[in-house]
Image (cartoon, rainbow, N blue to C red):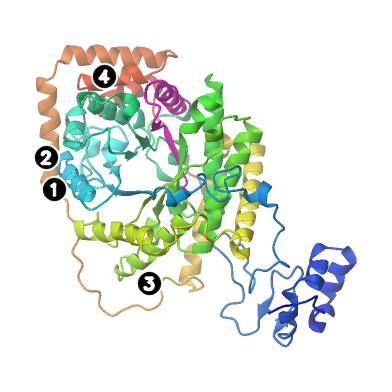
């Protein structure tokens, strides 16, 4: 059907707001008068009201007074040429695989190879987690993702009094190279890619992984994987920090330099918006604060004497996928474009790989409900689809029972099958950026980028991300967003199926995974037995040299590696660094 130049709807043209637009010569006036899609709106004159720039056009019989995304971006009845920003294809989008990578970082994306299907797993002992990894690999997962227990994350051995009650609960307990060898027994490290969600002790766990590779006679330059190693978001949202920011950043930049030289295929950091979003942020805040953290890491590495193209190609990111599918797709696309421009314009990166934002996605744990947990399969599917439509490089899909416990084998298999159905049956992986060019997606991409850029300007004005964290600015922004969302649930402005609407009278029983409390006793006995039979003089000497290095300026990774190879424990290494650097104490932010 052809639409020629359309006359203006009288109901629109007669409004004071439209007269003001015309008088000011704003582009929307010309766009409406000449737009091919304006004519059909004339037929709706009885139902249309005009507000300002047409973004608030509403049909009178709508479910809500205002429709908006989680970030407060108002949604019109429809997106069209009259209410969307003009785009320059080469400058704003570009071909897939070309700057600014809005449409994807590879020319053919999933037509060449599907994203890495990772399933985050780890619990109890190294032996039990090893069995789960082998099960997942047999089911078709294409990459491992290791969850560590809380003591390992904060540098405590299983027999530390502060570890009581937490050993093996939320992840696998790793005290030493002995545990790490068991964790990857029968899993060749030259053929599998491994992601490790670890931060304060990331350098130690990386060295343990490399020590396993050496035992398997796998060269470091053939080892592939990622450590999260993102300590700034721990101060913001998650809390598993040990040391103050300055020495923590030193460990990160030491890791950058060491891996650039020794393990060039290893991703040295996965800068995480995931936990920022889990703490209650909006999509825009997740993107902005993640990139602000990334800027701080780049600046720290440059200050340490590294050149940007020496370490930036191995920087990766970790984002959350929530339920608002179109906003999430726009967020991922905006992230690529904004990061590419930051690296080229702010840091003068020359290597194209330094400007490519490569990212892992995990579906939203905070969206899972204990009520009617089967419904979580649907939520996870929507979120996983957003990640794929947004061009993720790897993906973890949460299991339906994770609001209740660690996943069972059955629920983990269903979560993996969700990815496989999207990849092999849905068709969305068969063409690059299938939503590219859609008015809604392009406008949301633009708006998210603008709002994230505004946050970055505010953070720069405060003196950078470290200062913004120290003053509590970032934490307060997240707290306020979380409070608004909780109020929306309680008032039923936001509907959560099974929670504040469509409840059922009696929840059916759900089989959940329970960690045997005897695991803790077994793990304590293991680490104590290790200390009895190892070469204690070699351990003492390695730890002495580590402490000496920590008091100086040399790269600490070789000394950490030497310590783990003589079976120094995670707790012993962390305590020796605590002796030099102290511990971070958080100031409450309200």
Task: Tell me the distance, in whole angstroms, between the alpha carbons under discs 3 and 2.
Answer: 38 Å
Disc 2: which residue: 521
As measured in the structure, the alpha-carbon distance from the residue carrying label 4 to the one carrying label 3 is: 50 Å
Q: Residues within 10 Å of mark 2 (few under 14, many from 20)?
A: few
Q: Mark 4 highlights which residue?
A: 563
Q: Residue at x 20, y 57 (%)?
A: 408
* Residue 477 visible: no
Is the C-beta separation of discs 1 and 2 under 8 Å?
yes
First-in-chain label (4 vs 3): 3
| Element marked by disc 4 | helix
Span colored in magenta: 246-273
For label 4, the crowd category at 10 Å Cα-Cα, with few meaning under 14, some 14 to 19 and many 20 or more, is many
User: Which numbered disc, 4 or 3, marks the residue closer to the eye?
Assistant: 4
Marks 1 and 2, how far apart in space? 8 Å
Q: Secondary structure at mark 1?
A: loop
Is 307 in front, or is 60?
A: 307
**Whole-number angstrom distance, CA of label 4 to CA of label 1:** 30 Å
Relative to 221, is 472 above or below?
Answer: below
Q: Is tag 4's residue or tag 1's residue first in the polypeptide sequence?
A: 1
Location of residue 16 in the rendering, given as x and y in whole percent from the top left corner: 84, 75
Which residue is labeled 1 in the image? 517
The CA distance from mark 3 to mark 1 is 31 Å
Examine the structure image and report whether residue 520 is included in the region drawn in magenta: no
Q: Position of residue 255 (x, y in %)?
A: 41, 25
Q: Residues within 10 Å of mark 1 (few under 14, many from 20)?
A: some
Residue that label 3 marks: 499
């Amino acid at each position: 059907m052809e639409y020629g130049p359309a006359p203006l709807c009288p109901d629109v043209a007669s409004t004071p707001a439209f007269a003001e637009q015309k008088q000011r010569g704003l582009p929307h006036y010309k766009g409406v008068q000449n737009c091919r899609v304006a004519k059909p709106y004339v037929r709706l004159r009885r139902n249309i009201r005009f507000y300002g720039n047409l973004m608030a056009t509403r049909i009178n019989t709508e479910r809500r007074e205002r429709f908006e995304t989680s970030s407060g971006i108002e949604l019109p009845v429809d997106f069209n040429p009259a209410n969307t920003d003009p785009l320059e294809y080469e400058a704003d989008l570009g071909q897939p695989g070309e700057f600014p990578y809005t449409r994807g970082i590879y020319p053919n994306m999933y037509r060449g190879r599907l994203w890495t299907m990772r399933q985050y797993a780890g619990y109890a002992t190294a032996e039990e987690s090893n069995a789960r990894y082998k099960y997942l690999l047999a089911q078709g997962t294409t990459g491992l993702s290791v969850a560590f227990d809380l003591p390992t994350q904060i540098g405590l051995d299983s027999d530390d009094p502060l570890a009581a009650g937490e050993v093996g609960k939320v992840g696998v307990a790793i005290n030493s190279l002995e545990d790490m060898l068991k964790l990857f027994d029968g899993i060749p490290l030259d053929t599998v890619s491994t992601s490790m969600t670890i931060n304060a002790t990331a350098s130690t766990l990386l060295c343990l992984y490399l020590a396993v590779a050496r035992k398997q006679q796998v060269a470091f330059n053939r080892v592939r994987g990622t450590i999260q190693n993102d300590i700034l978001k721990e101060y913001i949202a998650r809390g598993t920090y040990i040391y103050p920011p300055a020495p923590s950043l030193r460990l990160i930049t030491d890791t950058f330099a060491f891996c650039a030289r020794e393990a060039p295929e290893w991703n040295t950091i996965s800068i995480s918006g995931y936990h920022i979003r889990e703490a209650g942020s909006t999509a825009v805040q997740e993107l902005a604060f993640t990139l602000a953290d990334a800027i701080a890491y780049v600046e720290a590495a440059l200050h340490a004497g590294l050149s940007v193209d020496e370490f930036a190609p191995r920087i990766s990111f970790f984002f959350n996928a929530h339920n608002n599918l179109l906003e999430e797709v726009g967020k991922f696309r905006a992230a690529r474009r904004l990061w590419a421009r930051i690296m080229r314009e702010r840091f003068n990166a020359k290597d194209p790989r330094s400007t490519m934002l490569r990212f892992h996605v995990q579906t939203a744990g905070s969206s899972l409900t204990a009520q009617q947990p089967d419904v979580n399969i649907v939520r996870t599917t929507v979120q996983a689809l957003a990640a794929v439509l947004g061009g993720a490089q790897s993906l973890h899909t949460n299991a339906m029972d994770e609001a209740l416990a660690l996943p069972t084998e059955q629920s983990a298999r269903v979560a993996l099958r969700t990815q496989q159905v999207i990849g092999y049956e849905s068709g969305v992986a068969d063409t690059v950026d299938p939503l590219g060019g859609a008015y809604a997606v392009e406008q949301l991409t633009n708006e998210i980028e603008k709002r994230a850029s505004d946050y970055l300007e505010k953070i720069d004005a405060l003196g950078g991300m470290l200062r913004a964290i120290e003053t509590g600015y970032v934490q307060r922004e997240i707290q306020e967003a979380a409070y608004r969302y909780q109020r929306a649930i309680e008032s039923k402005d936001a509907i959560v199926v099974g929670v504040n609407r469509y409840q059922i009278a009696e929840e059916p029983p759900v089989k959940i995974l329970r960690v045997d409390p005897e695991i803790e006793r077994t793990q304590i006995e293991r680490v104590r037995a290790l200390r009895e039979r190892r070469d204690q003089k070699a351990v003492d000497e390695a730890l002495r040299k580590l402490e000496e290095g920590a008091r100086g300026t040399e790269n600490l990774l070789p000394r950490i590696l030497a310590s783990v190879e003589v079976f120094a424990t995670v707790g012993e290494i962390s305590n020796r660094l605590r002796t030099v650097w102290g511990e971070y104490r958080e100031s409450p932010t309200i």
